[in-house]
Image (cartoon, grey):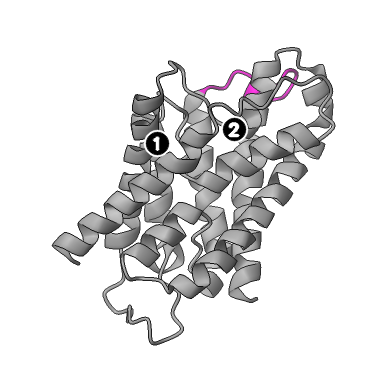
Amino acid sequence: MTPFIAELVGTMLLILLGLGVVANVVLDKTKGNGAGVVLVTLAWGFSVYVGVVVAGPYSGAHLNPAVTIGLAIGGKFAWSSVLPYCIAQIIGAAIGATMVGFMYIDHFKATKNLDLKLGVFCTGAEIRNPIPNLFSEAFGTFVLLMGVFYISDPSIDTSLTNDIKIGLGSVGALPIALFVVVIGMALGGTTGYAINPTRDLIPRLMHGILPLGEKRDGDWGYAWIPLFGPLLGAAGAAGLFLIIGS
């Protein structure tokens, strides 16, 4: 498996399982309807685990443009590979979101609350206030990237002169999955913790494309927050890493 395919498949699995648990909890007439935020946060963490286990040996399993860009800023990943990784993540997210749409198609059509249908695909703030919302996403992603930088195997050569893809696959799937769980439980109450630009932007786009029955607009006025907030947080974590070192 090439790194490009690994990032695509890993991101597809992440989005399929992550959006899938939200669909199971919020859509009408599902087995998990009303199960609550604890199930959602646990499943998102394990979704990361699945994606990392599959993609990690081949690409480092970034599965997130904020991780890819943050690692590049921190000198742990080649800038020449950033765009291919991000493209793979975008394609994988689109496929994963499409799979969720078709798997739960009858439940989407049965759900009358159009906000809940949109909420399967993307995040939104409980209290709309752009600057605090932006920093909520930044803080969550900052914590994630600190895990990526510091939960590492000391035996791995991080030199950019070799072929090792430093990323989630190299730092261990389970610790990062647990990071995602605690970020969701501790910091996700404000905006729903996208902490991944592709996780929000691409499924939001697919919500508008997929035949889900009656739908509302995609709330595009909010979409810039889960896009730029994670990038801001990733840059902050990378900057701190460069200052204090490993």
Q: Is residue 226 visible?
A: yes
Per the picture, the main secondary structure of the magenta-coloured stretch is loop
Q: Residues within 10 Å of mark 2 (few under 14, many from 20)?
A: many
Q: Are marks 1 and 2 in contact (CB under 8 Å)?
A: no
Upstream in the sequence, badge 1 or badge 2? Answer: 2
Q: Amino acid at mark 1?
A: Glu
- For the residues labelled 1 and 2, the Cα–Cα distance comes to 13 Å
Q: Which residue is mark 1?
A: 137
Part of the protein shown in magenta? 25-36
Residue 159 x, y percent position in the rendering: 33, 82
Residue labelled with disc 2: 122
Q: Position of residue 144 (x, y in %)?
A: 36, 49
Residue found at x 50% / y 55%: 65
Extreme residue in the left direction: 244
Left or right, residue 95 beside residue 176: right
* Closer to us: 181 or 83: 83
- Residue 32 counted in the magenta span: yes
Label 1 element class: helix
The residue under the point 38% across, 87% down is 161
What residue appears at the point 70 percent right and 13 percent down from the top-left corner? Answer: 113
Left/right placement of residue 231 relative to residue 218 reads left
Residue 177 vertical position relative to residue 210 in the rendered view, above or below: below
* Residue 166 falls inside the magenta stretch: no
Q: What's the amino acid at mark 2? A: Cys
Circle on res. 229: none
Q: Position of residue 89 (x, y in %)?
A: 60, 57
